[in-house]
Amino acid sequence: MEMPTVTNQENGKYLMIADKDLKGSQKCLSQILRLVLKELSLFYSREVNGVSLLYDLLHSPWLQALLKVYECLQEYMKRKPIPVLSQAQALSFEVMELLQEAPQSPEVRELRQVLKAKHFQALLNAHDTVAQKDFEPVLPPLPDDIPENEEALRIVCLVKNKQPLGATIKRHEITGDIMIARIIHGGLADKSGLLYAGDKLVEVNGISVEGLEPEQVIHILAMSEGTIMFKVIPVSDRPINNQTMVYVRTMAKYCPWEDPIIPCVDAGLPFQKGEILQIVDRNDSLWWQARKVSDFGACAGLIPSNHLLKRKQREFWWSQPFQPQTYLKSTISNTMEEEDDIRIDEKCVEEDEETFASEELSEDEEEFAGYDHQFFIAGFRRSMRLCRRKSHISQHAYIHCANSCYSALGAPYEEVVRYQRHPYDKHRLIVLLGPSGVGVNELRRRLIETNPNHFQGAVPHTTRAKKNYEENGREYHYVSKETFESLVYGHRMLEFGEYKGNLYGTSVDAVQKVLDEGKVCILDLEPQSIQMARTHDLKPYVIFIKPSTLNRMRQSRKNARIITDYYVNIKFKDEDLQEMEDLAKKMEIQFGQFFDRVIVNDSLQEACAQLLTAVKQAQNEPQWVPATWICSDTEP
């Protein structure tokens, strides 16, 4: 907007008028606005460019109303409002007694009814409670013996509330002084900005801490009420936290109360596999400070650093129950060279029956699955599960594969970022997994059936001969054994195996072909194949299909059948259901950190609806993904 040109003479005239009108009294904003409008009206009559727009803006009713509200609030704050009465409820009782003696007119009866109402009495009671309470903190007077040198001693007064003070203390190894070991991010001490790690604690509420044990200092704090006064000798070099905050996904479970080397158990932050944490402080090489993204308002807690967990990963202490009899404090202290922290807190010392599709079909049966539809669902998954059982792959081998998968990861924490898929980007791969018999294939089939033009499965590869009714690239990609093995050696197979002397597998190229067509690829994988699929090209969204309770499965599967390799229909037995439940628990324990969503298949209809919602959210809503996926996308 082109503003009007105002000469110095006109400026001086305006300032003299404003100064004359404002001198001797403080004018409100609306009066000042009127003076501005008066001056602008002169330029408005001359049709100066831009003045009419500014004039209309300042003359608008909404601005006038806004300024009037502002003035009322300013005037209200100047009066420093205080309750007119502090005993309003008692006054209401007196009024009701007087009304009993007054002539009983309709107005009197109505007034008595209003005053006797429970909600009105509760309102008056709340008013009196607030009116009689003094919300101003009462700080104790400063002692008279304060040294002339301010930096030699600092007096810190904190008002104690339900929030933890958020600091840990330790005894100095050489001098025996009580020191502030660390300040917990987000705690009261951190928010005050008056206490720092390394400060020497001299007194607490006038009580000298010289010669006291850290536990005794904690007891003094626990008995304190209201304000707490610390007398400290400040550290010469204050620690500066200039690190950027990062977000990580936890790849292991951590329980502070089972960790024998944590400086302060109550300051620890417990977490489960797959949780997202915000790391707020990494100055300590052994113990980081973090909080869960689901609870940003909470005080941070201590977690083992990446370096510490890697060092202890070989001992598996972070995943094994703590055995008190094996804990030797002296040995651990010498090994870790860490302070014995004590946190400054009184609690611390540092439906209808459903037919579930079987996971086990013969080769001929699985090849015809979905053949009568307008799309094809290859049966590689079911065949591969059969071949694993026939090859006598035990659970020990399965567990070994899980551990090797974790070892390949190599880090207890995985840095993550929020990722929002652009509408023009490829869709994310959807990976379904779950124990055999839980209904993964049925849910996958139903999802694709809802919209075959949008959802599609990847066509597997096989070395077996093509049959007369088959078409290459529809049921399978038919390749030679040499070609198949080259794909395996080139790490182009997400999953593969042998069945009846033939090789079967799902390749990365088959998945990419579906994604390149602008469709959502729905894939069913075994848990140990997740790591192979977790690349920035595929960006898989992993959904775990979890079985319901045993009682619910007995009801929902009482008419379901297991179709074996010999076409024998067998009902689900209790041991089959128990095996399914046990295997699901093992999958969660070993691979739960990779699950983006867990759906309980209590009802196929409900589970399918949840699955469809989850798939849409994975494509259209922000999700936490490994930072390496995004970095790989942005690299030149």
Image (tube, rainbow, N blue to C red):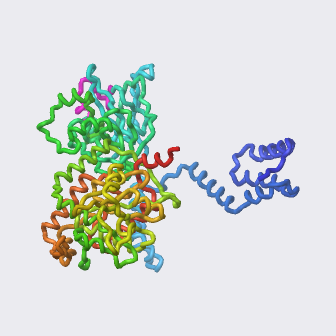
Give the image quarter of residue 116: bottom left
The vertical placement of 244 against 33, above or below, is above
Q: Percent x, y for residue 557?
A: 20, 74
Front-most of 432 and 624? 432
Determine if residue 170 is in view.
Answer: yes
**In screen coordinates, is 333 left or right of 373?**
left
**In screen coordinates, is 67 left or right of 362?**
right
Front-most of 168 and 2? 2
Magenta stretch encompasses residue 208 = yes
Q: Percent x, y for residue 555?
A: 19, 75
Q: Percent x, y for residue 130?
A: 41, 54
Give the image quarter of residue 191: top left
Residue sitting farthest toward the right: 46
Q: Tell how many labels.
A: 0
Front-most of 322 and 534? 534
| Identity of the residue drawn at 15% across and 67% down | 576
Front-most of 463 and 547? 463
Magenta stretch encompasses residue 88 = no
The vertical placement of 295 against 618, above or below, is above
The vertical placement of 229 against 103, above or below, is above
| Identity of the residue drawn at 25% across and 73% down | 356
Q: Which residues are magenta?
A: 201-218
Q: Percent x, y for residue 100?
A: 40, 73
Determine if residue 121 is in view.
Answer: no
| Identity of the residue drawn at 33% across and 36% down | 167
